[in-house]
Image: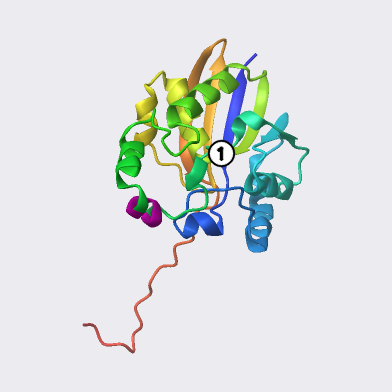
Amino acid sequence: MTRRLTLLCVPATAALRAGRFPADNALNDDDGVHTATWAGKLGRPDRVLSSPMACACDTARALGLPVSVEDALREVDYGRWRGQSLKDVGAAEPEALAAWLSDPGMNAHGGESLAAVSDRAGLWLSGREPGHTLAVTHASVIRAIVVHALGAPARAVMQLDIAPLTLTTLSAHADAWRVTSVAVPVVVPVVVPVVARSDVPPH
């Protein structure tokens, strides 16, 4: 039986918008309400799984579907950098930050390396059940899942961008995973055309 996987990237938290390394940050009330307005577009998956982090649980609850929490979907543990701004870390530990930005095996912050996240995500992906699974998780985890599905090296996680509130989809027959879409926005921006006014002279 086919396995389908839809990965929903959590909305941006206030900490992320401020350029801080994620801690266990909750969503603002407005973020949850916004999520509820498009939840119907996700259809009826066979199961909904969520990272245990507050922002993911908040998002999952807003979907209005039964949810199970899975620890393997948790955000990267950034160790002593949790809650700090990129600017402050760069000023205090420039060499460590430079290494983290270039080496997926780096964990000098005392937390979890991106390579370790890739291993964790790969184990989780290999255990997916038949049917359609919707997983609410974080950009770091989604990148790791995609890289594992493609059989790419862990370093490839640094070459992927996953924006908040996007969907990434995969499908599998037997053990072969196929990436079918990456970082598709769940809400399509409305573009309002500019209409020239007849009473305004052209420039």
The correct choice, above or below, for 21 with respect to 102 in the image is below
* Picture residue at 54% right of the left edge, 24% below the top: 120
> Mark 1 is on which residue type?
Glu
* Picture residue at 26% right of the left edge, 87% below the top: 201
Q: Is residue 73 visible?
A: yes
- Image quarter hosting the C terminus: bottom left
Q: Quadrant of residue 172?
A: top right
The answer to which of 77 and 28 lies nearer the viewer is 77
Q: Position of residue 42 (x, y in %)?
A: 65, 41
Q: Quadrant of residue 37?
A: bottom right
Q: Position of residue 136 (x, y in %)?
A: 62, 39
* Picture residue at 36% right of the left edge, 52% below the top: 92
Q: Is residue 45 visible?
A: no
- Which residue, given by chain and number where applicable, does mark 1 sit on? 75
The correct choice, above or below, for 13 with respect to 161 in the image is below
The answer to which of 98 and 175 lies nearer the viewer is 98
* Side (left or right) of 122 relative to 68: left
Please report the bounds of the magenta region as a residue range: 87-91
